[in-house]
Image: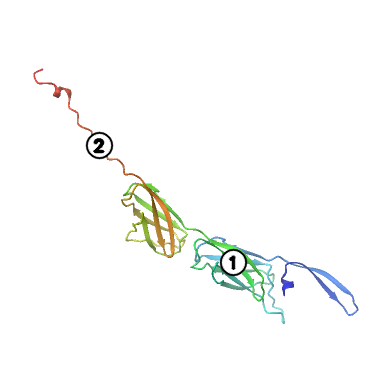
Amino acid sequence: NTTTLTTGSQTVSAFDSRGRTGNTTLTIPTRALKVSPETSRRSSTVMVTGTGFPVSSTRPGAEANPTVQIRYEITGRDPNTVATVFSNVTGDFTASFIVPRDAPIPSSNTVAARIVGTAISETKIHSLPDRLVKLIPESGPPGTSIIVFGTNFPAFTAVLSLTIGQIPVLSSSASTTNTEGSFTATAVVPELAVGTQPVAMEIGDSTALVSFRVTPPPATPVPAKPTTPAALLAPLGT
């Protein structure tokens, strides 16, 4: 019941038929929940550890083992039960779950360990990191070859598009993200106006936008005029 699930010190009293009483103090430990890692990508494995939860009992006649539901709660969606566990004889449990493949990037979501049949739960926050993109180099004239590095995208997902200044530059051998959600692609900067130009990419249902600075092309050197020796310029017969 709610009393026996409330953490802290509780007084336990015993009475006999002659009116004698005895008291003692029972300390119910504080419940705690831990998730590891606290930040990871879609489809990654997260470990959940709980302490101080209701104890499972194998004693004949004892109540059914209390069930703990692990839920992954994304704002605006129904809670998703990702694991169901029972605590051991010391009130501890360990479970794991897979981060949903459709979790928003980036986002901070709630991992809740709920004691079934009660309104009691413990929560922790799990986050999905934002996408990171780096260009090498970050500036150059039209015709510059660049390398695009991306990470924290959905794993094993094709790079659907890559544009510079809204001009498609994705090569025919399109890249695919690896198990870490990372990819590498190459492109050539098209003929664009000097200044900052957007570099946009689409990987699965995820997008990212960075900038490339287009610089003027190098000046074409002007050939030096040939010089005529002074002796050839002197009038004949002098």
Choose mark 2 or mark 1, whichever is in front: 2
How many neighbours does mark 1 have within 10 angstroms: few (below 14), some (14-19), or many (20 or more)?
many
Instruction: Single out the residue that lies furthest toward the right.
Output: 18
Up the image or down, 233 lies above or below 171; here it is above
Q: Residue at x 63, y 71 (%)?
A: 114
- Percent across and percent down for residue 203 are 41, 62
- Percent across and percent down for residue 191 are 31, 51
Up the image or down, 133 lies above or below 42; here it is above
Q: Nearer the viewer, residue 230 or 90?
A: 230
Q: Nearer the viewer, residue 202 or 229?
A: 202
For label 2, the residue is: 222
For label 1, the residue is: 111
Mark 2 to mark 1 CA distance (whole Å): 68 Å
Q: Residue at x 43, y 60 (%)?
A: 207
The quarter holding residue 21 reads bottom right
Q: Residue at x 19, y 28 (%)?
A: 227
Asked whether, in this view, residue 23 is left or right of residue 76, the answer is right
The quarter holding residue 230 reads top left
